[in-house]
Amino acid sequence: MSDKAQRLADKLVGEAEKTLAFFRSLPEEAWNVQLYEDGAMWRVRDVFEHLCISEHSLRRLFERVLATGQGAPEGFDVDAFNKEKTGRFASLSRDELFALYAETRRATIAFTQGLTDEQFAIRARHPAMGDASLEDMIKMIYLHHQMHMRDVKKGLNI
């Protein structure tokens, strides 16, 4: 495994631990607090589910980038995707969502560990960032999670 793959994998591990610890620390009632008042209208629970769904979907996109060189299609609507997908795990308990998150992150880490430096440099279209290297797309996963955790903290006055 390259040094770059190891560094990114280590960062994904550390950030997943922080994310899980934070969401596990929230009391049950906090999960129903409305965070966003426009667009998505997500509660804290919806945000956590979104992190699971988006990471899984992005990893599948990364696999496609490696296989075909193609990223997200031109005109991909991130908001429409989020609206359509979020809520699909509404029947899962908090513990089941935590397990899904951990499983999803383990798969992302394994994928990252298998990449070469040459593969990290491959460029394709990210759904939100536009043209980006695979390395930057992977970094965006944990940055995206940090952004939403910051929103949750602000929304809950933590």
Image (cartoon, grey):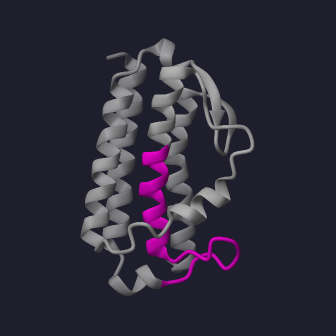
Magenta stretch holds residue 38: yes
Q: Could you tell me which residue is drawn at 51 percent across and 80 percent down?
A: 156
Q: Which range of residues does the magenta coloring cover?
A: 33-57
Looking at the image, residue 74 sits to the left or right of residue 35; the answer is right
Quarter-wise, where is residue 131 in the image? top right
Please identify the quadrant where the N terminus is shown.
top left
The outermost residue toward the bottom is: 29
Residue 126 in the image: x percent, y percent? 63, 37
Magenta stretch holds residue 54: yes
The outermost residue toward the top is: 118
Q: Could you tell me which residue is drawn at 56 percent across and 18 percent down?
A: 121
Establish if 94 lies above or below 71.
below
Residue 75 in the image: x percent, y percent? 74, 44
Residue 112 in the image: x percent, y percent? 38, 29
Q: Could you tell me which residue is drawn at 66 percent across and 59 percent down?
A: 79
Looking at the image, residue 151 sits to the left or right of residue 25; the answer is right
The outermost residue toward the right is: 75
Residue 98 in the image: x percent, y percent? 29, 62
Looking at the image, residue 118 sits to the left or right of residue 5; the answer is right
Along the line of sight, the residue nearer the viewer: 80 or 121: 80
Along the line of sight, the residue nearer the viewer: 149 or 54: 54
Along the line of sight, the residue nearer the viewer: 97 or 35: 97
Quarter-wise, where is residue 151 in the image? bottom right
Q: Could you tell me which residue is drawn at 39 percent across and 58 percent down?
A: 19
